[in-house]
Image (cartoon, rainbow, N blue to C red):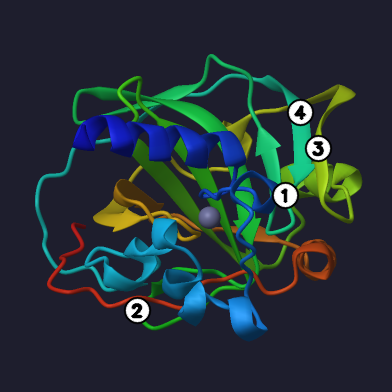
Amino acid sequence: MKKIALISVMAMALSGVACTSNDVKDNKVSWGYTGTTAAIHWGDLSSEFATCKTGKEQSPIDIIPMVDIAQSEIQFDYHTSPMTILNNGHTVQVNFDKGSSIAFKGKTFNLLQVHFHTPSENFLMGESYPLEAHFVHASDAGDLAVVAVLINEGQASDFVQKVVDHMPSSKSEAKTIEGVTVNGLNFIPSQDGHLGFKGSLTTPPCTEGVQWLMMKAQTTASKAQIDALNSVMQENNRPVQSLNGRVVHK
Ligand SMILES: [Zn+2]
């Protein structure tokens, strides 16, 4: 029963969106990043969100690489997909068609979507970044893996420009943009090297058991691109959470 309940929560979360979230409309519980529904209150807004308060492996974190072990590599098998984009009221998200995946530790995770946070949710060695991208993947069994990329201000990004050009300025259903394609690989600066740790969804219901894979290589977007995303999403970063003894593998 427990497992079935977990899978149904996962399915609900994934059908919603972000990293991922039940849609306000779906669960009738409103949450956000400011005021009475801000992150510090999520665990009290609904019994379904209890893990946001009681969880011991919550995300994001301040990533401080600690343990040097021979890590499994991530094998990327990403392909070009039509661009489907939405604004779920919490983030701007691009959905990918089926067919892209990663392999990690012998398991295949299918790429579902990428979405953005301004500023970054994860910190690296105490530093915040102006933008972070989360590529959300799920295995057929419902296990989640998020490939995260930290983005500095600098040269403009072609990928981010497509997002900025087509993002809905307010909450909206997903729409496929005719004639526009995206490939996640164009946004991942180098496939070599990542920092791995266990965590959770960074939005309600804060479900745990998520494999986080922070790419060591970072990329850039222009100030105008970051500002454009921020003007639509506002600040949508959950504060960093306690490690509770977790270690980051480098
Ligand atoms: Zn996210």
Separation of residues labelled 2 and 1 (CA atoms): 30 Å
* Pointer 3 residue: 173
Characterize the local packing of mark 1: few (<14), some (14-19) or many (20 or more) Cα atoms within 10 angstroms: many
| Res 114 label | none
Q: In this view, does 221 lie to the left or right of 122?
A: right
Bin the neighbour count of mark 3 within 10 Å (Cα to Cα): few under 14, some 14-19, many 20 and up: few
Q: How far apart are marks 1 and 4 (CA)?
A: 16 Å
**Disc 2 C-beta below 8 A from ligand 1:** no
Q: Name the residue under label 1.
A: 88
Q: Do the residues labelled 2 and 1 touch (CB within 8 Å)?
A: no
Question: Hey, what amino acid is under mark 1?
Answer: Asn
Q: Which of marks 2 and 4 is nearer the N terminus?
A: 4
Location of residue 187 (image quadrant): top right
Residue under pointer 4: 83
Spatial distance from mark 3 to mark 1, Cα to Cα?
8 Å
Tell me residue 171's x, y (percent): 82, 51
Q: Is residue 239 left or right of residue 174?
A: left
Residue 125, which numbered label?
Answer: 2
234 lies left or right of 107? right
Disc nearer the start of the sequence (1/4):
4
> Mark 4 vs mark 3: which is more N-terminal?
4
Helix, strand, or loop for circle 1? loop
The alpha-carbon separation of the residues under discs 4 and 3 comes to: 14 Å
Dots 3, 2 in contact, CB < 8 A:
no
Nearest-to-viewer mark from 3 and 2: 3
User: Pointer 2: residues within 10 angstroms few (<14), some, or many (20+)?
Assistant: few
Between 186 and 232, which is closer to the camera in this rendering? 232
**Residue under the image location 58 percent in, 19 percent down:** 79
